[in-house]
Image (cartoon, rainbow, N blue to C red):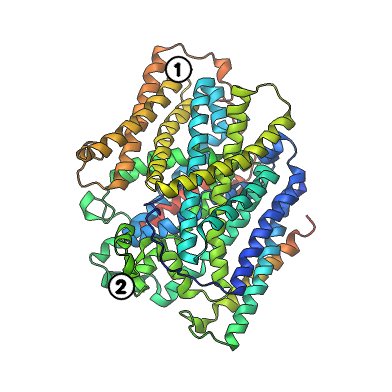
Amino acid sequence: MKQHVNRIWFLIGVLLAIYGVLILAAGIYNWFAPAAHPVQLAGLHSGVWWGGLLLALGLFYIGRYRRV
Amino acid sequence: MGSLPGTFAAIPLAASLIALGPVDLAIIVIYFLFVIGIGVYLKRFANTGHDFFMAGREMTAWIAGLSFISANLGALELLGWAGSAYQYGLLAVHWYWIGAIPAMLFLGVVMMPFYYVCKTHSVPGYLELRYGPHTRSLAAICFAAMTILMSGVNMFAMAIVMQVVLGWNLHLSIWVSSLTVALYVGFGGLLSAIFNEVLQFMLIWLGALLVPILGLYQAGGWSGMVRRIEHNVAHGATYVHAWSTLGHFSTNPMGINWIGIVFGLGAILSMGYWTTDFLVVQRVMAAKDLRSAKMAPVIGAAFKMFVPFIVILPGLLGLALLPMKLYPQTYVQAHASADLFSYNDVLPLMLVRYCGPGLLGLGVTALIAGFMSGMAGNISAFATVWTYDIYRPLIRAQASDSHYVAMGRWCTVLGVLISIATAYVAMHFQSIMDYVQALFSFFIAPLFGTVVLGMLWKRATRAGGFWGLLAGTTSSIAMYLWVKFDPAALKYIALSPQAKPMAEDMFRALWCFLIGVAVTVLVSLATRPAAAVQLQGLVWGHTEIPSERGYPLLHRPIFWAALIFAGLVVLNIIFW
């Protein structure tokens, strides 16, 4: 199998890490500056932990497949 | 499956449901740049026909399996079935469980060895080897035409959704989305389509998963959701069971009975779609070896079993939690000034309910990714079938490999342009969406009969295959027209005058499959059988399928298929 096939996992990692940073940053900003019309369950701060999850997942894929 | 439970054509032009912020827009723009970048990066690996049309046959089981399921997991599928779950309740789950899992496992365990061992490039390519060029041409022309029409009609439907949900310009949505698909498929061929489908699969899950998690949390778990549905909806108890209401057409919201679900959907329509529709089968054919090719649909089945969590459950949660009532689209259209929402709005409404800045962009990107994976699937399959099954045998047989690759790239662009044209035709003749959906279904069930007999019955002859496929297809069209012009005929086709359109589709599929099989058998018995040497690698009994006994149990597709099937049985019992 050619090595470029497994490159997809690295690329997924990069995109998830970028999205994780953006969503985490937006979540932290909204934590300290809540929106005028917050969404349901805004108190759970889902943007923070979901953004963190995406970032962790992205970094895992980058680390695991960066040398493929 | 690819069919949509109701047309989007009637969505009214209301104010947008979702207002995106700068972070959301950044997430969407990054996505578009990323998928085009993947196409540009992969162009260097797609120089031969083998690379461009078959992705070099180098995919691992995981990549082929995720691509296999992602090509089917279009945005209209997400929105449409979430809306169906709101409309019909848990009955919609059958389109993911009995209407998909057995067929995917059957493809992996039984049919894939024949597709893979004969080294064909497509499903029509298999038909040529088994039944000859006439059957190949019939299948290829029908598939190419239907695929490209479906692509355009779905494109229009998606643009309408984008307009209603996001307030985006209809023309901009059509052109930007489809040209992005043309670029990345045109550059990298099937390899690029598969790469992007795996990426899109991740985005769809990560973008849509929050809604059911937060919804269940707010509803107080499954039991809390059920209590709310029973409180909110008349006969609410019938909305939370998968089988117990299927004794008769009139005892469930879908107007169907268990025979239609088990035999029409489970045994015929889904088998036809998942095992012979080249749009999905092409992904599995790109696997690097036979074991991966068998494993890929099994992996796809495992994930498919849990797709209801992000599609069906949000629809049910909408019934339980949304403060407003949703209506059929025809009703919403008739009361346009009342600011009502339709069933198909349930997923966007749930997204808006829980997703703040950033998460909303991710959710919308999941919808866009779903649309593009579905369209790329159509376009890459069209390019292969057009180039290898129509252009090469019927128009220019002796050309260089680079000529066919160039043809593949050009017809990728051409396919997208025809799809766009179809989208604009659909815009003016909205009922065309129903007809094209119906036309697509005409072909799938008879094709399954032809292919499965070809693989499992060595006595089936070339003439039998051709006339069986033709008879099955024409009988399906005839039954459709009969009910269209004489609605009373429904009691003959669907066995009950109380049957609804969904039930009619299921029973029509069942009858046209049986007609196609009967004609194939009769004509085959009346014609001279093929010599054994011509059937090598194509038919059960004349094909040496490599044994899996050398592999550990955990590496055998049959073990995982049995495990997933057992899981399917358990799930159906739990949600009986």
Q: Residues within 10 Å of mark 1 (few under 14, many from 20)?
A: many
B482 left or right of B533 in image: left
State the residue at coordinates (29%, 45%). B503
State the residue at coordinates (52%, 63%). B168
Q: Is residue B528 above or below residue B535?
A: above
Q: Nearer the viewer, residue A59 or B562?
A: A59
A66 left or right of A28 in image: right
Residue B79, picture quadrant: bottom left
State the residue at coordinates (62%, 53%). B198
Which amino acid type is marked by label 1? Ala
Q: Nearer the viewer, residue B19 or B206?
A: B19
Q: Nearer the viewer, residue B568 or B306?
A: B306
Q: Which residue is mark 1?
A: B463
Q: Residue furthest front?
A: B428
Q: Which residue is mark 2?
A: B227
Secondary element under disc 2, as helix, strand or loop, is helix
